Amino acid sequence: MTLRQPAASGLVPKTAIRHGKPSERGHVAAICEPDINDLAKRLRFTPQEGRIWLDDQRMLLMHASSLQALRQELIDSLGLERARGLISRIGYQAGAHDAEVTKKVRAGADSYSHFLGGPQLVSLEGLVRCEPIALDIDVSTGRYFGAFHLVDCAEAEVHVKTYGIATEGVCWMLTGYACGYTSTFMGRPILWREFECRATGHEKCRVVGQPVEDWDAEARHDLRFLQIGEFLHCPGSDAGQPPAGPKIRQRRADTPENSLGLVGISTGFNAVCHKIQKAAPTDATVLFLGESGVGKEIFSKTVHRVSKRSAGPFVAVNCAAIPEALMESELFGVTKGAFTGASASRPGRFERANGGTLFLDEIGTLSWASQGKLLRALQEGEIERVGDTMVRKVDVRVIAATNVDLSEAVRRGEFRQDLFYRINVFPIKVPPLRERRDDIPLMMDWFLQRFCKKYDKAITGFRERGVDALRNYQWPGNIREMENMIERAVILADDGGALDLCHLFTAGEELDASSFRLRPDGNIESDAGDIDQGAIAAPVRAALPSLAETEVESLERAVAEAKGNLAFAARLLGISRPTMAYRLRKYGLR
């Protein structure tokens, strides 16, 4: 999808970027914008219920004076730098959500009208009037350039009322909004900067946006306000620094293949990072909670990396992968001759982690006996090797993780209450990816750059329908599933091409069929592309049960016939046991 307004329309040629400061060339003329009525009709007031709606998003009608007071309170209490970051991230969230609205309302419209829904929505919301200056988009190659005038900006107005004329642009929420909206639309990080502002004495504000790597290093420093690419940065580490090269090839060369890869902008992600920053300097036991694949081990490594123990070892142990008979020797070590096969003495994980951090993954799978032995080691700070009588002191900071509800396991008698209270000192809930949809475009770009470097391929980006499908997918496997999907897609795609649905959803993933929509030409379309009318019309006419209802019935009958034996039930249906367990969880049958 390439979008270039014809010269006859008066669009300025693409801006030249020199030293990070754009300079438009040619005569600036107005671009004919699409009708805003389709968006305006989605704005609904229900005063009886005390609600305002923009499509399915709840909105608030706020006094400009309240925005003025809020900005002043934030700036005076937090300082200019931190206040700007907070306000920018609020704008980013709003822009990402509005991108979802325009994708729904203008499904099937031309790409030009589709994209300009964002500037029209922010005008509809009363923040500013946007006048497009220049626009150049190609989603499949990741190319983007945009320049807009912001006319009568509310942010600049309230800032001047409080602080008078400023020395630099103050439209922080709006530039954050543009970053969120455009990044969601493009499926990759787009950075916007303000070069003229009413608060600095200009007639209009002027903002310019383009991919992160197209800006110079000084401009990319603005990413700190959005926390894109710089999360929990610690001295001596450059993993969070913006890429140094101006081109995609250089950017991929700078992408660390085994970097921690903490990428996000969502409220849930920032909440986790905030808690990590609070807990990391201490020696308190941290317990990460969340579904499988949400990145609990990566967050655990981050706690270690930014703690005072960062120079010490980080030792991880997957409690679910160690047989019960070997658990004690793995954790505490063994002396020579302690049992058959113990031909030499060796330290356990606690000793190896001395002076550093011990990460206990899937701690909820430990047996009752192992829980008791672990509790003593945590309480006393000392261990005994199997077959030894000498007590060894260990200085270890413990981080645990589980996808099990431990409080419920305590009630069922499956987990020791005393151990639960010992490890539940500082719990951190990591939200699943479906609750962090604002992070998806950033993660898509992160994994794309990483695997393009790994496999030496020059994939240009994602096609628009691929971007939409990835955002709308429910991600039962969370970040781990996205990583695997994009790695597989990079391998399948042709060098120099873009990732499409045929490369992404190739392992039996189920796209939500409820996202069908009616296009203006009368055809039915979903996030996966066009849908054959006859393929869905016949079941509707015949009033057959839905596919989900049929699958639930088959699962229930198989489990009943197998008398609860999932392996046998899976064989009856001709599927694997993990697939059987996944589908039972999917429909809430276990």
Image (cartoon, helix red, strand yellow):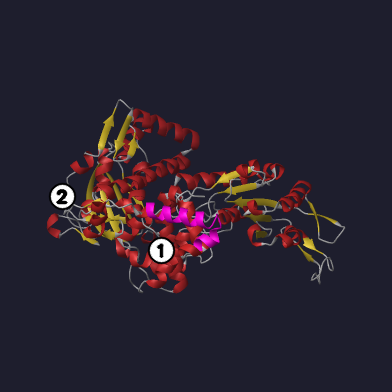
* Amino acid residing under circle 1: Gly
- The kind of secondary structure the magenta stretch mainly shows is helix
Q: Rate crowding at label 1 as few (under 14), some (14 to 19) or many (20 or more) other CA atoms within 10 Å.
A: few
Quadrant including the N terminus: bottom left
Q: Which mark is residue 32?
A: 2
> x, y (%) of residue 274?
54, 44
Q: Rate crowding at label 2 as few (under 14), some (14 to 19) or many (20 or more) other CA atoms within 10 Å.
A: few
Q: Nearer the viewer, mark 2 or mark 1?
A: 1
> x, y (%) of residue 564?
55, 54
- Residue 367 in the figure: left or right of residue 401: right
Q: Residue at 35% across / 74% down in the picture?
A: 494
Query: What residue range appears in magenta?
Result: 549-570
- Secondary structure of the residue carrying tag 2 is loop
Q: Which residue is mark 1?
A: 508
- Residue 578 in the figure: left or right of residue 328: left
Q: Nearer the viewer, residue 38 or 262?
A: 38
* Amino acid residing under circle 2: Cys
